[in-house]
Image (spheres, rainbow, N blue to C red):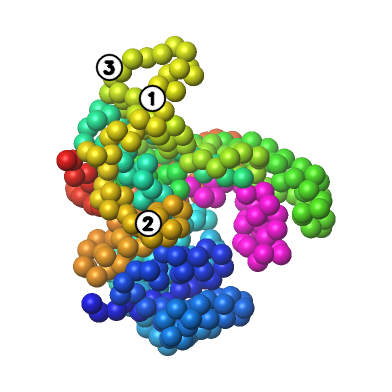
Amino acid sequence: MQKIGLAIIGLGARGFSLMKNAIMPIDGVEIVGLCDLYADRCERAAAYVKEKTGKSPLTGPDYRNLLETLRPDAALIATGWDTHTEIALFCMELKIPAAVEVGGAFSLEECWALVDTYERTRTPIMLMENCCFGKAEMLATSMARAGVFGKIVHCSGAYAHDLREEILTGEENRHYRLNFYKKYNCDNYPTHDLGPIAKLLGINRGNRMVSLVSVASGSWGLKEYVETRKDRINPNRIGEEYKQADMVNTLITCEGGETISLRLDTTLPRTYNREFTVRGTRGMYEMGNNMVFLDGMKEYFDTMKGYLTYQNNAVEYEEKYLPDEWRQITAGGLKSGHGGMDGITHRAFFRALREGAEMPIDVYDMAAWMCITCLSAKSIAERGMPQAVPDFTRGAYKTRPLRDVFTPVVR
């Protein structure tokens, strides 16, 4: 097997974890370059690669110099949100296939630049949205595409994750979120909840998002957390203002008549949940209880009895509908990050790269999902006014086949 030489740009917590747990276990992938603005991060990652492989990758703080010098077979971009597009464009111009970590785009111009550059260079690019490869999301998508839920009417999801300490220690930990929460008010991380829904609904493949409205709450969670956690948070944070709302709700309409609801919920106390839910004319799937409810099943008006009866019954549908990525996952694969999702996502990227196939999450998906950030900001600023979602395929979505790794093989 011919090796794929990979350069990793960005070696903070996410980049280093992906390198160690998701990428290095993949046969035929060799880490040849490492880049970060902070020398200690490069040194730590290079030492790990040397220890495990006996080889020393090229390192440096300037991604342009590193990529031009190495010309690697592929690059992983795991930097802060505001540099993803810039680096991805540079990679495409050099004909270096890019795997791009997730985040929102802060202008439509960024999104169109990604599409235009891809169409001119035809350099492969994939948004590494790991939640599209989650077990629950892939099972429900397989069932939906097989018609189990009937006509899909509505899907909902959330990025519901208490990030208060991570945000407020951003200065100490050299993490990018803090500055974004000071400067912007938007759905800043839409792809975890939107990505799996878009795949299920065939967005950019026969269907598309048409418009959205977003509304936002006030911003109190971070300020109160600083005041009540003085033993854990730098007191210099006291009195700072944050533009980012505690809750952002976005409602999207689709050309096919479906609606999508998203929620950003990261600055109040809570447990983690993506709240992925699918509603159709013949039934539903709900991630929180891993529950399938289909037309004809007994309905219980006692809410607790109903949930207890059907809770976790989705496992009964795995034998017939669960995709092979999860049926065949190994114990090692489950340790690749986020319960196995990270490994599946990266294997899908390298497989498509080797085979010259379409990327599972391509540039049109990337642009459509990332633009929710800037459009939500505009809608919020205009008190919930609707915003048109561009068709980044320029009409091609009407005939693009719904044929990808998410298409079910019903047993």
The residue where tag 3 is placed is 296
Q: Is residue 352 above or below residue 193?
A: below
174 horizontally vs 232: left or right: left
Please identify the quarter of the rendering in which residue 118 is found. Answer: bottom left
Packing grade of label 2 (10 A; few <14, some 14-19, many >=20) is: few
**Depth-wise, is mark 2 or mark 3 nearer the camera?**
2
Helix or strand or loop: what does disc 2 sit on? helix
The residue where tag 1 is placed is 310
335 horizontally vs 151: left or right: right
- Figure quadrant of the C terminus: top left
Place of residue 58 in the rendered image (x, y in percent of width and height, measured from the top left): 47, 86
- Residue, far top: 301
Q: CA distance from mark 2 to mark 1?
A: 28 Å
Q: CA distance from mark 1 to mark 3?
A: 13 Å
Res. 327 mark: none
Place of residue 115 in the rendered image (x, y in percent of width and height, measured from the top left): 35, 61
Question: Which sits in the foreground, 213 or 320?
Answer: 320
**Depth-wise, is mark 2 or mark 1 nearer the camera?**
2
Res. 331 mark: 2
Q: CA distance from mark 2 to mark 3?
A: 37 Å
**Depth-wise, is mark 1 or mark 3 nearer the camera?**
1
Amino acid at circle 1:
Tyr
Place of residue 275 in the rendered image (x, y in percent of width and height, measured from the top left): 47, 37
